Image (cartoon, rainbow, N blue to C red):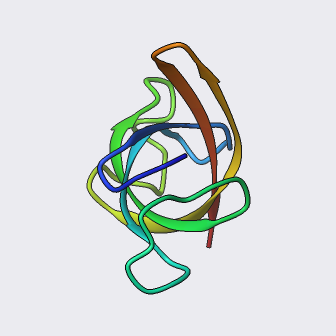
Amino acid sequence: MVQKGTFLKVIDNSGAKKVCCIHIVKGYRKRYAFIGDLVIVSVKSLRSKRRLFSRIKKGRSFKSFNYSDKTKLSFVFIRIVRIF
């Protein structure tokens, strides 16, 4: 489950390392996004090797979808893939 404000780990080769969910696209006043749902994310940190050459800059927003999630006790691990 992803809510607004959730920090997510990126698994594509775009250069972004962590992003933050700022909006859930489907539905009116939808609170949670599950696997396969579209979300709008903002880039919070970049990978160290790709920082200089990446087209993605910190603070930009993108559409992405929740590829998989895994919940263990209080630890949430979420993977996000970016859509152009």
The residue shown at (46%, 67%) is 62
Q: Nearer the viewer, residue 76 or 83?
A: 76
Q: Residue furthest bottom?
A: 28
Q: Residue furthest top?
A: 73
For residue 13, above or below residue 49 = below
Q: Nearer the viewer, residue 7 or 3?
A: 3
The residue shown at (65%, 65%) is 37
In the image, residue 57 lies at what x, y percent? 35, 53
The residue shown at (37%, 43%) is 6
Q: Nearer the viewer, residue 65 or 34?
A: 34
Total labels drawn: 0
In the image, residue 29 lies at what x, y percent? 37, 79
Name the image quarter holding residue 4.
bottom left
For residue 76, above or below residue 11 = above
In the image, residue 26 lies at what x, y percent? 55, 80
Residue 1 is left or right of residue 20, and the answer is: right
Residue 43 is left or right of residue 14, and the answer is: left
Name the image quarter holding residue 84.
bottom right
For residue 75, above or below residue 7 = above
Q: Nearer the viewer, residue 55 or 34?
A: 34
Residue 58 is left or right of residue 84, and the answer is: left
The residue shown at (43%, 24%) is 48
In the image, residue 41 lies at what x, y percent? 42, 59
